[in-house]
Image (tube, helix red, strand yellow):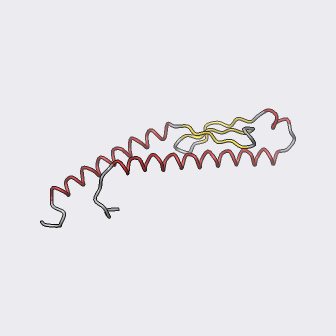
């Protein structure tokens, strides 16, 4: 098969895809265990989110609690949580890119 994809190439490609699938599963497990922090108000509110986007903790500086400004506190919490979730998305994309980049697939396959 001149210029085509022979059976040997097809088998090699399938092995590469299986390898990539296995690596992605491993990376997903590792990501689930990682913890990312988001903060707002100069650190007045800090949250921790895991790689599965579950909110693990919320820490609020006592100075913010002593102020009588509920709306500001709510905004700070929202900002911190959204920052942490954005960081998780970036972490997931970076880890998956590492896996995808490590597997050599024929050009134009995806």
Task: Tell me where residue 25 appears, x and y as whole percent.
Answer: 38, 44
Which residue: 59% across, 49% down?
Answer: 86
Task: Tell me where residue 105 appears, x and y as whole percent.
Answer: 29, 56
Q: Is residue 3 left or right of residue 93?
A: left
Which residue: 74% across, 36% down?
Answer: 60
Q: Foreground: 100 or 45? A: 100
Which residue: 43% across, 43% down?
Answer: 28
Residue 97, compared with residue 59, is above or below; it is below
Quarter occupied by residue 2: bottom left
Residue 97, compared with residue 39, is above or below; it is below
Which residue: 66% across, 39% down?
Answer: 47
Task: Tell me where residue 11 appears, x and y as whole percent.
Answer: 19, 54
Quadrant of image for the N terminus:
bottom left
The number of discs equals: 0
Q: Is residue 65 left or right of residue 31?
A: right
Q: Foreground: 17 or 2? A: 2
């Amino acid at each position: 098969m001149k210029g085509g994809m022979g059976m040997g190439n097809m088998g090699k490609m399938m092995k590469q895809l299986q390898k990539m699938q296995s690596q992605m599963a491993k990376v997903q497990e590792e990501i689930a265990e990682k913890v990312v922090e988001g903060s707002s108000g100069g650190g007045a509110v800090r949250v921790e989110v895991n790689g599965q986007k579950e909110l693990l903790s919320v820490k609020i500086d006592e100075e913010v609690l002593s102020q009588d400004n509920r709306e500001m506190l709510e905004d700070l919490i929202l900002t911190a949580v959204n920052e942490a979730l954005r960081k998780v998305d970036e972490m997931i994309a970076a880890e998956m890119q590492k896996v995808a980049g490590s597997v050599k697939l024929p050009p134009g396959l995806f």
